[in-house]
């Protein structure tokens, strides 16, 4: 039989756990809204290799470089994601042709497709910034069977081609708030916990919806 002191200790632990859970859920909910806000301002690039062979992975990077160079030109005057999306949708066939040209130049005959689609991405750290897990609009380039390791970054704003020091300016120009810039560039030192909270919240929400 538990003593009064033991019962008091257990209640204190239970209360602390409940408070911790409530705090985690609150952080998760707020962080999820931040992720959803970010996703409305970003277009990501997702390049899928034919396979994991060394040759196919090298080809993936060649295709990535060609597509990234062209999209940077296309989107340099886009003021927001809506305009960027519109420009990309009008150039999908051109981007497919550019990718196909690079594939042929490398001596392969893989088919390739380019499309804009909503895609789920895990939390990802890049040079100078990071993005939380969640659904984002992505320019998706699939080479051959698309069964190899993929590569992803951001085509709008042009964060993948910006030097780390230029990331804040590029993000602000695309309509990011100061808080969002601080979060993705690690000026907000709690970004790791907040990004992880997004994943927890999404998993919890998924269970509720099942």
Image (spheres, rainbow, N blue to C red):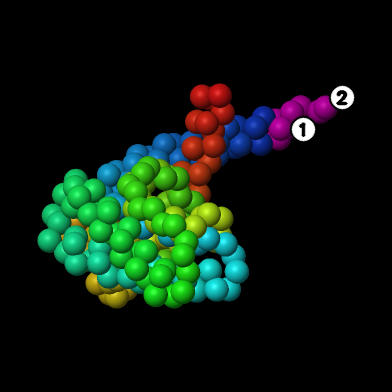
Q: Is residue 144 left or right of residue 114?
A: right
Q: Residue at x 22, y 54 (%)?
A: 91
Residue 80: where, in percent of width, then height? 17, 51
Q: Residue at x 87, y 24 (%)?
A: 1
Q: Residue at x 23, y 48 (%)?
A: 89
170 and 70: which is toward the camera: 70
As helix, strand or loop, the secondary structure at mark 1 comes to helix
What number of labels is visible?
2
Residue 62: where, in percent of width, then height? 41, 73
- Asked whether residue 191 is in view, the answer is no
Q: Which quarter of the picture shows residue 53? A: bottom right
Residue 112: where, in percent of width, then height? 41, 57
Magenta-tinted stretch: 1-10
Q: Residue at x 52, y 31 (%)?
A: 206
Q: Which quarter of the picture shows residue 4? A: top right
Q: Which residue is mark 2?
A: 1
Q: Which residue is mark 1?
A: 6
């Amino acid at each position: 039989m538990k003593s009064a002191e033991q019962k008091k200790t257990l209640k204190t632990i239970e209360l602390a756990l409940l408070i911790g859970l409530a705090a985690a859920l609150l952080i998760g909910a707020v962080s999820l809204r931040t992720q959803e806000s970010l996703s409305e301002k970003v277009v990501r690039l997702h390049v899928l290799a034919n396979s994991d062979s060394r040759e196919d992975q090298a080809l993936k990077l060649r295709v990535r470089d060609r597509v990234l160079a062209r999209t940077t030109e296309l989107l340099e005057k886009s003021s927001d994601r809506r305009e960027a999306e519109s420009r990309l949708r009008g150039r999908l066939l051109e981007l497919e042709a550019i990718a196909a040209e690079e594939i042929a130049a490398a001596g392969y005959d893989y088919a390739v497709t380019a499309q804009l689609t909503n895609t789920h991405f895990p939390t990802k750290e890049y040079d100078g910034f990071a993005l939380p897990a969640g659904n984002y609009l992505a320019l998706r380039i699939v080479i051959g069977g698309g069964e190899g390791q993929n590569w992803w970054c951001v085509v709008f704003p042009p964060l993948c081609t910006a030097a780390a020091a230029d990331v804040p300016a590029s993000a602000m120009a695309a309509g990011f708030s100061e808080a969002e810039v601080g979060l993705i560039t690690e000026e907000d030192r709690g970004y790791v916990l907040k990004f992880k909270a997004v994943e927890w919240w999404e998993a919890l929400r998924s269970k509720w919806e099942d």
